Image (tube, rainbow, N blue to C red):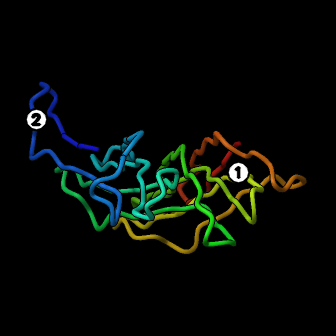
Amino acid sequence: VYVQKFDSHGDPTGAEIKLEATGNTTGDDLNPYVTQLENSGEYIVTWEGRDGTGNSKDFSIYVQKFNMDGEAVGTTAKLEAIVTDNSILGVDSGAKVTGVGHDGDYIVSWFGNERTSGTSVSYNVYAQRFNADGTKNGSQISIEGMTVSDAYDRYQNIISMGNDGDFVVVY
């Protein structure tokens, strides 16, 4: 995944930046998505990448914040579905970003394969709050249908509400 910022005339500004999955510089990096944070000029890039486990089906979500000059802020964050059996690999996909509050904080939501044992597979939606400096704020949130477990909760959307950091997720 490559990132290049352009000015209003379509001319490149700054250097092209290559983003890669943490711990895996030779694997696939797919489905990049960029989201602007309000009118600050800052933006967030998310993508899916193999995370170095050696399994071609194990993809995680990666998140990198950039400042208004196109420079990376902090380190790349890795997000994954919660699994109870570490020998089982999952697929995380569909990252969405929204800014929350008025301090530059943001939330990333995604859905992941939540294998709990054997061949049983379910999908769940997750969210992770980030501080303005690109660091994680608290633990990730698991958002599962209230009456159905082991379901296929996918294809979420997220929006912010007001200036206090509230947000709404639909799935």
Residues at discs 2 and 1 in contact (Cβ within 8 Å): no
Q: Does 142 appear above or below 7? A: below
The C terminus is located in which quarter? top right
- Residue 99's label in the rendered image is none
Q: Does 140 appear above or below 4? A: below
- Secondary structure, mark 1, is strand
Q: Does 156 appear above or below 124? A: above
Q: Dividing the picture into quarters, in which one does residue 156 lie?
A: top right
Place of residue 118 in the rendered image (x, y in percent of width and height, measured from the top left): 75, 62
Q: Residue at x 49, y 72 (%)?
A: 137
The front one of 148 and 101 is 148
- Residue 123's label in the rendered image is 1
The front one of 62 and 58 is 58
Q: Dividing the picture into quarters, in which one does residue 35 lie?
A: top left
- Secondary structure, mark 2, is strand
Amino acid carrying label 1: it is Tyr
Give the number of callouts: 2
Q: Residues within 10 Å of mark 1 (few under 14, many from 20)?
A: many
Q: Residue at x 39, y 45 (%)?
A: 38
Place of residue 133 in the rendered image (x, y in percent of width and height, measured from the top left): 34, 67
- Residue 12's label in the rendered image is 2
Place of residue 74 in the rendered image (x, y in percent of width and height, measured from the top left): 28, 67
Between marks 2 and 1 in the image, the one whose residue lies nearer the viewer: 1
Place of residue 24 in the rendered image (x, y in percent of width and height, measured from the top left): 32, 61
Sequence order check: which comes first, mark 2 or mark 1? 2
Amino acid carrying label 2: it is Pro
Side of 164 where 26 appears, left or right: left
